[in-house]
């Protein structure tokens, strides 16, 4: 843990503890605590997740699985403006595909990428629960509705000029060009589901691109597990509480009761 983070943690600790006492169970304070750190750092750092784990008495894997579930949390340093365009069904029916293509073209980056100047990060996300105002997006978690190409031009211009209504994110660290979660490092340390053999995207939250639901199942059932590699098959029996991961050769990697 860096000195900077230690100072930040000690500054935010009283607010975190105030959240904890508001809830019947300490773990319920996880989301507001993560928002607090994201506001201060511009993203949710590994240090912040470890701090929450220690404070709330829950495992690092439980913190990680919750934080990685929500597109509200950024797990890597991102641009000053985090642009999250909805690709859900209703937005799709109202032209999200062309809005996303326009946005990618205007920014010069793709899904989960940051512009070279570090001003914009771009992500295509699942339903933002504002379907009656499709197509829509969030800018630093604030909504923009009924998108059109000319609206996007105006928004990007005012963000570049620093006059956009939503304030820029804190940038405590320089963002990388891509903020994808890396298969090799983060899956290997148990931070991310490896997905199934046929689904290569460890950034998939278990939504549209995960029709089997297995990635999501990993997070719910195996939240205390470290992922050791890709699995051909997972056997899960709710009633008895037994979960197994079977590897490509059929050997049981992990079994629990
Ligand atoms: S599908 Fe876009 S907000 Fe619901």
Image (spheres, grey):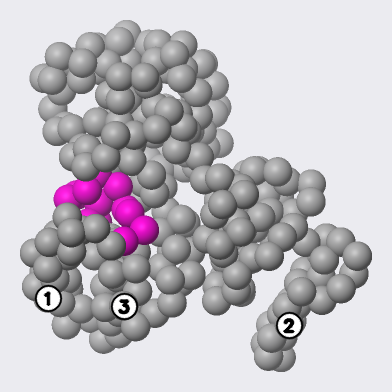
Dot 1 crowding, Cα within 10 Å, few <14, some 14–19, many 20+: few
Mark 1 and mark 2: span between their CA atoms?
38 Å
Q: Nearer the viewer, mark 3 or mark 2?
A: 3
Question: In the image, which residues are magenta?
Answer: 35-47
**Camera-nearest residue between 49 and 111:** 49
Residue positioned 54% across, 28% down in the render: 92
Decide if residue 6 is in sight here: yes
Dot 3 crowding, Cα within 10 Å, few <14, some 14–19, many 20+: few
**Camera-nearest residue between 208 and 106:** 106
Which disc is residue 18 wearing? 1
Which disc is residue 57 wearing? none
For label 2, the residue is 255
Q: Position of residue 223 (x, y in %)?
A: 55, 72
Dot 2 crowding, Cα within 10 Å, few <14, some 14–19, many 20+: few
Task: Report the side of 183 relative to 124 (left or right).
Answer: right
Q: Position of residue 157 (x, y in %)?
A: 23, 11
For label 3, the residue is 54
């Amino acid at each position: 843990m860096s000195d900077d983070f230690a100072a930040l943690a000690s500054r935010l600790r009283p607010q975190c503890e105030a959240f904890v006492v508001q809830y019947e169970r300490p773990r319920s304070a996880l989301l507001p605590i993560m928002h607090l750190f994201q506001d201060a750092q511009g993203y949710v750092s590994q240090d912040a997740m470890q701090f929450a784990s220690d404070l709330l008495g829950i495992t690092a894997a439980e913190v990680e699985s919750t934080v990685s579930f929500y597109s509200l949390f950024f797990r890597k340093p991102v641009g000053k403006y985090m642009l999250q365009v909805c690709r859900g069904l209703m937005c799709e029916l109202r032209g999200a595909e062309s809005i996303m293509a326009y946005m990618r073209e205007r920014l010069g980056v793709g899904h989960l990428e940051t512009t070279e100047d570090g001003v914009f990060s771009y992500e295509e996300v699942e339903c933002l629960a504002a379907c009656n105002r499709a197509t829509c997006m969030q800018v630093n978690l604030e909504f923009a509705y009924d998108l059109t190409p000319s609206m996007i031009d105006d928004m990007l211009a005012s963000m570049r000029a620093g006059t956009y209504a939503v304030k820029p994110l804190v940038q405590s660290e320089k963002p990388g060009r891509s903020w994808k979660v890396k298969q090799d490092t983060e899956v290997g340390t148990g931070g991310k589901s490896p997905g199934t053999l046929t689904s290569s995207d460890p950034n998939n939250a278990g939504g549209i691109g995960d029709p089997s639901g297995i990635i999501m199942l990993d997070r719910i059932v195996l939240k205390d597990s470290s992922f050791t590699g890709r699995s051909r098959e997972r056997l899960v029996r709710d009633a008895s509480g037994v979960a197994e991961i079977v590897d490509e050769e059929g050997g049981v990697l992990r079994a629990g009761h």
